[in-house]
Image (cartoon, rainbow, N blue to C red):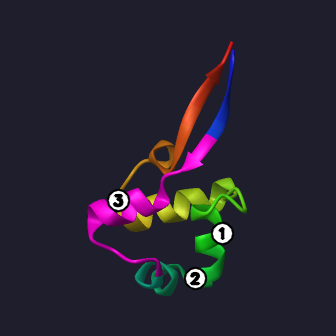
């Protein structure tokens, strides 16, 4: 059994915290365009980035994507 990543839920996580992509990009010292690429599904965030984002917005790494099980 494995998993695959579905839709990126970063925008939903930011909305729950009342944060913006800009504020997160400032905190992480990342380009907002890169974060928008994750949100729009143009890129998949590397694990280190996902951990940094999760810590910055107080969520679990698993909350950042829809996770689909493969049987």
Q: Residues within 10 Å of mark 3 (few under 14, many from 20)?
A: few
**Disc 2 vs disc 1: Cβ atoms closer than 8 Å?**
no
Which corner quadrant of the image does residue 13 belong to?
bottom left
Q: Residues within 10 Å of mark 2 (few under 14, many from 20)?
A: some
Does dot 3 land on a helix, a strand or a loop?
loop
- How far, Cα to Cα, is label 2 from label 1? 9 Å
As for residue 55 lying within the magenta part, the answer is no
Give the quarter of the figure containing the C terminus: top right
Which corner quadrant of the image does residue 32 belong to?
bottom right
Q: Residue at x 56, y 85 (%)?
A: 29
State the residue position of label 1. Answer: 37
Does dot 1 land on a helix, a strand or a loop?
helix
Say which of marks 3 and 2 sits in front: 2
Of the numbered discs in the image, which one, if any, rests on residue 32? 2
Q: Residue at x 57, y 47 (%)?
A: 7
Looking at the image, tell me whether mark 2 or mark 1 is earlier in sequence order.
2
Give the quarter of the figure containing the N terminus: top right
Report whether residue 5 is seen.
yes
- How far, Cα to Cα, is label 1 from label 3? 21 Å
Q: Which residues are magenta?
A: 6-21
State the residue position of label 3. Answer: 58
Q: Residue at x 28, y 60 (%)?
A: 16
């Amino acid at each position: 059994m494995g998993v695959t990543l579905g839709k990126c839920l970063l925008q939903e996580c930011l909305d729950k915290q009342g944060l913006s992509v800009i504020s997160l990009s400032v905190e992480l010292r990342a380009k907002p365009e890169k974060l928008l690429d994750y949100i729009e599904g143009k890129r998949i965030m590397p694990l280190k980035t996902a951990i940094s984002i999760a810590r910055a917005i107080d969520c679990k790494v698993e909350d950042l994507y829809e996770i689909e099980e493969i049987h």
